[in-house]
Image: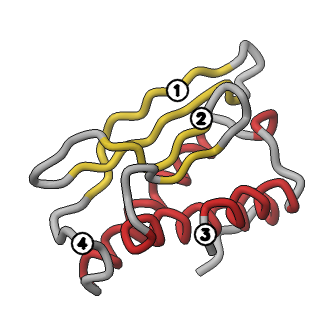
Amino acid sequence: MNSEEARNYFEKKGLSYEGITEGDICALVMLLNKHVKQAVKAHIVSVDTMRMSQKIKSKYKTNGTLKSCYLYINSHYFTQREAISFNPDGFIGFAGWGDSGNRQPIINAFIEWVEYMSEGDIVK
């Protein structure tokens, strides 16, 4: 799945920022860690030192739902590149800096998270 297909899948499952809480973002980070680690082990990504950053830049409405959120990825030669961004205008970005190989584990984690969000259970 590519970035556009992932965004469409999010909408098709009936999801929006209104249903995303801080706990949901934590679940996404856990899935990103899992998928990035698997991709590094399998040499799918271009750099074998990629790992999720601990930095999360997010804003929430007073009711606790998401306004915007930026999740980052690090490597031995870069820090805090965008992994996934939930932009204030509703656009969801996926590793705009990366090629399809580097972007794929991020999209795979996002798709697994969409399944979790829409069904309430993480897909194994």
**CA–CA distance in space, label 1 to label 4:** 28 Å
- Per the image, label 4 sits on a secondary structure element best described as loop
**CA–CA distance in space, label 1 to label 3:** 24 Å
- The mark nearer the N terminus, 1 or 4, is 4
- The mark nearer the N terminus, 1 or 2, is 2
| Residue in view at x 61 percent, y 69 percent | 2
Q: Which residue is mark 3?
A: 2
Q: Which residue is mark 4?
A: 46
The image shows residue 113 at horizontal and vertical percentages of 63, 61
- The mark nearer the N terminus, 4 or 2, is 2
> Residue 101 falls in which quadrant of the image?
bottom left
Instruction: Confirm or deny contact between disc 4 and disc 2 (CB under 8 A).
Output: no
The image shows residue 43 at horizontal and vertical percentages of 25, 83
Vertical arrangement, residue 121 with respect to residue 27, above or below: below
- The mark nearer the N terminus, 3 or 2, is 3
Q: Which mark is residue 22?
A: 2
Q: Nearer the viewer, residue 32 or 105?
A: 105
Q: Which residue is mark 1?
A: 58
**CA–CA distance in space, label 1 to label 2:** 9 Å
**CA–CA distance in space, label 4 to label 2:** 30 Å
Q: From the viewer's perspective, is the residue at label 4 or at label 2 nearer? A: 4
- Per the image, label 2 sits on a secondary structure element best described as helix
Crowd band around label 1 with a 10 angstrom C-alpha radius: few (<14), some (14–19), many (20+) = some
Instruction: Confirm or deny contact between disc 1 and disc 2 (CB under 8 A).
Output: yes
| Residue in view at x 85 percent, y 61 percent | 13
Q: Nearer the viewer, residue 69 or 92?
A: 92
Residue type, mark 3 in image: Asn
Residue type, mark 2 in image: Glu
Residue projecting furthest to the left: 76
